[in-house]
Image: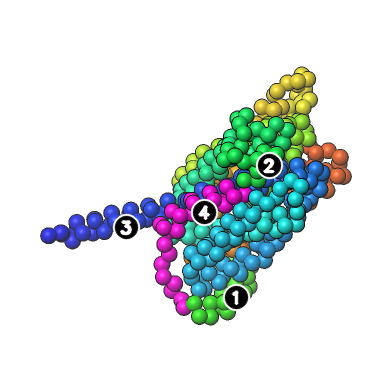
Amino acid sequence: MTTGRAAGATEGTAAGKTLRRRIWGWFFFDWASQPYNTLLITFIFAPYVKELMGDGSAAQAAWGFGIGAAGIVIALLAPVLGALADSGGHRLRWIWLFSALYVVGAGMLWFAAPGDFNLTTTLVFFALGLVGMEFATIFTNAMLPDLGPREQIGRISGNGWAFGYLGGLIALALMLALFAESAATGKTFLGLDPVLGLDAAQREGTRAVGPLTALWYAVFMIPFFLWVKEPPASRPATGAVRRGLAQLKDTLARLPRRPSLFAYLASSMFYRDALNGMYAFGGIYAAGVLGWSVVDTGVFGILAIISGALFAWLGGHADTRFGPKPVIAAMILLLTLVAVAIVLVDRSSVFGLPVPEGSNLPDLAFYLFGVLIGAAGGVLQSASRSMMVRQADPARMTEAFGLFALSGKATSFLAPLLIGTVTALSGSQRIGVTPLIVLFVVGLALLRWVKPDGDRAE
């Protein structure tokens, strides 16, 4: 006969296994979705579009419009969808829906073929997949508080972010080694023909990045959907739309009376915009100032991803020990210093000290910057997710992450616009990136009014 104590232990063990499985399932969303950022937005598909268009400026402008259009949709709908989900429940249904958009949008990029390239169609499908990824992220992030006690949320968030970086790194390595061919040689990074008999002349190896990203997501979301369960909806679905919109209106009206949440959304708006600007313009800046090739930029990116994975994990443990606010402040300060250092390095000098012609010291300095940007960026994004959990109303968590997405997209134009304007006025790429310093400083200053445990601390 089982004693009550033993039965309790057994139940506790079973519950512990279920929770661990649920946490790992939640981790797999980061693993599954990261290649959209790594392969499509940054390293593979975006440069391919530039090759097809020929004109780098036109390609950069078109890519910016595509991402910007998706950003507007996300900014407008994210808080609304979050409120609807909190009101009617069924977050997993929403994730299924937006996962379908992700897979369709990514998979259809296969048809961006040389000689039959339609820019508008390509950007529509790219934006469709991006919207799917961002909205699915809102709903999965809102599940974070259910994965453990508050003091463990930072560690869980950091581990998930690190796991996602690792997935993106492996996907990138597979693409470079086996699929993506050089336009000049038709060979992959390892000097091989694209696998599976893909036609290098038609750039099928590179175009496979779309279906590969879609397939990667579909396969690695299986653990998520198998292991991540949500409690039954506490409210009936009937009237969810009306109730959700009313809640959102109430939240926005009360936002000025929640100074910590208000300050955090404003702070994150500026420092995340600066971080995204650093990601977006790092390669272009290095290519212009140091004359880097695509290979140099690729190495820069790989170093950033590896350091991002490692330090997101370490940052999660720091978050658990010290709380997210000091971690965020430290990372903003580090990134501000990196932004200053970047301005002080070019081919002829490092931090104002002249270097001999042909010296690789400027390159090594930029590789170091890549490591620091990846490390601080990974920690900052993980801790930001953890901090949002502390600032939000537990009963309206999805809505809160919708507002978090809104704050991340509302001024996404700011860093590119400031950098473009200052670069055009000064005629200098080095001076042109100085607005990033200002954005980081503003974000750090606003963090002063953010309470570590949110407005509920009062």
Q: Amino acid at mark 1?
A: Leu
The mark closer to the camera, 3 or 2, is 2
Name the residue type under label 2. Arg
Which corner quadrant of the image does residue 130 belong to?
Answer: bottom right
| Within-10-Å neighbours for mark 3: few <14, some 14–19, many 20+ | few
Residue at horizontal 71 percent and vertical 48 percent from the top: 113
Q: Secondary structure at mark 3?
A: helix
Tell me which secondary structure the magenta stretch mostly adopts.
helix
Decide if residue 5 is on the left or right side of residue 51: left
Going from N to C along the chain, the mark reached first, 2 or 1, is 2
Residue at the location (53% across, 69% down)?
85
Rendered location of residue 73, percent (x, y): 68, 63
Query: Mark 3: which amino acid?
Result: Ala
Label 3 – label 2 distance at C-alpha: 50 Å
Residues at marks 2 and 4 touching, judged by CB atoms closer than 8 Å:
no
Q: Which residues are magenta?
A: 209-236
275 relative to 102, above or below? above
Task: Choose top left, top right, bottom left or bottom right for residue 232.
Answer: bottom left
Quickly name the residue at label 2.
203
**Can residue 6 be seen here?**
yes
Which label is found at residue 15? 3
- Which residue is depicted at the point 21% across and 59% down? 7
**What crowding class fits label 1: few (fewer than 14 Cα within 10 Å), some (14-19), or many (20 or more)?**
some
Give the foreground label among 3 and 4: 4
Q: Position of residue 79 (x, y in %)?
A: 61, 67
- Which dot, 2 or 4, sits closer to the camera? 2
